[in-house]
Amino acid sequence: MVEENMRRKLIVGNWKMHGSRDQVSQLLGDIESGSERLLKDVEICVCPTYLHLGLAFDLLASKSGVGKGQIKLGAQNVHVEAAGAFTGEVSAHMLSEYGVSYVIVGHSERRQIFAESNQFVAEKFMAAQASRLTPILCVGESLDQRQDDETERVVLNQLDAVITVAGIAAMKEAVIAYEPVWAIGTGKTASPAQAQQVHRTLREHLDRLDPAIAKGMRIIYGGSVKAANAKELFSQPDIDGGLVGGASLEAEEFISICKSADQESCKL
Ligand code: 13P
C-alpha cells in the first residue's frame, strides 16, 4: 500500500518559447518578490529558454544565490551527449554551469514536433542525471488514445521505456509529470478525479517495482493548470504539484498557483 503525502509539492513553470530579455527579467523579479511570503513547503522552479538561462541565473544569483533561494532553475531540454559536433544542442554539464537543477525530458511537444522516441527520452533522462540534474519525465496520452481507453497503457509504456534503460533505482532522483496531450494549451484540464486516477496508476506501478521509490516519487500534473483549478488538483492524494505552461507567464497567476500548493502542503 502506497502511503500518501510524504512529498514536498513542486511547481514548475515551463515558459516554452516565450519572452524577451526584458520580459524574463520582469517576470522572474515579480515571481521572486511574490513568492517571498510563501512557506518552505513548496518548491518553485522556472524553465526559461536556453537563451535566457544565463540571464535568469545572473538575476537569481544577485539575490539569494541560484538553488539556495526558493526559486530553482530548470531547462526545457538537454542533449544526450556530453560534447561534440551536435549543432544547436546543449549538454547537461553546460546546463549545470548555469545553476540548473531540473530538466524537462519527454515533453509531448518534443515527442510530437521533434519526433523524440522513448529511447531518446530515456537517454536524455540519463544524461541529465549524469550531470546531477533532476529529470522531469513527461508522460501523457493523446485525445484519441484516451477515447480508445489506452491511457494507462500509453503512460506506463512511456515510464517503462525509461526504467528499462535507466533502471528503477534511477527513479529515486527524478520527477514524473503527467501531461495529457489533450489538456496542454487547450484550456481543457483533466478533472481532479481523472488526473488522480492516472497519478495513482503510475504510483502503483512504481510500487510494484520499488515501494520506497513509489512513496517518495513526486508526480506532478500539467495541462491547463491555472489559479482557478490548482487547489482542487493539488488536494488529490497523488498529485504532488504542477507543470504549468501558459499560466506561468503571468507572475500573479503563477504565484497564486504556488500558494495553492503551499496550502495543500501545510495540511499534511
Ligand atoms: P499549459 O499549462 O499551457 O496547458 O501547458 C502545459 C505544459 O505543457 C507544461 O509543460
Image: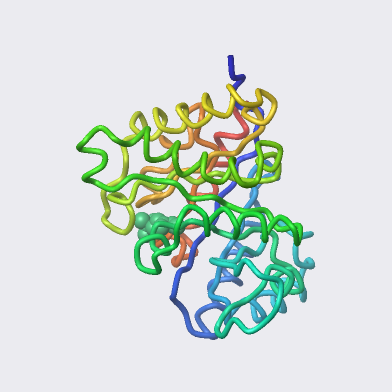
Q: Is residue 201 found left or right of 183 in the rendered image?
A: right
Colouring style: rainbow
Snapshot quadrant of residue 42 = top right
Q: How many marks?
A: 0
**169 and 246: which is toward the camera:** 169
Residue shown at the point (62%, 33%) measured from the top left: 266
Residue 252 in sight from this viewpoint: yes
In the rendered image, residue 18, in percent from the top left (x then y), is placed at 44, 76
Snapshot quadrant of residue 250 = bottom left
In the rendered image, residue 254, in percent from the top left (x then y), is placed at 48, 57
Residue shown at the point (62%, 66%) measured from the top left: 80
Residue 253 in sight from this viewpoint: no
Residue shown at the point (58%, 14%) measured from the top left: 1
Quarter of the C terminus within the rendering: top right
Look at the picture and state if 267 lies above or below 154: above
Residue shown at the point (70%, 26%) measured from the top left: 212
Look at the picture and state if 19 lies above or below 255: below
**105 and 164: which is toward the camera:** 164
In the rendered image, residue 85, in percent from the top left (x then y), is placed at 63, 84
In the rendered image, residue 169, in percent from the top left (x then y), is placed at 71, 37
> In terms of image quarters, where does ligand 1 lie?
bottom left
Q: Residue furthest top?
A: 1
Look at the picture and state if 130 lies above or below 140: below
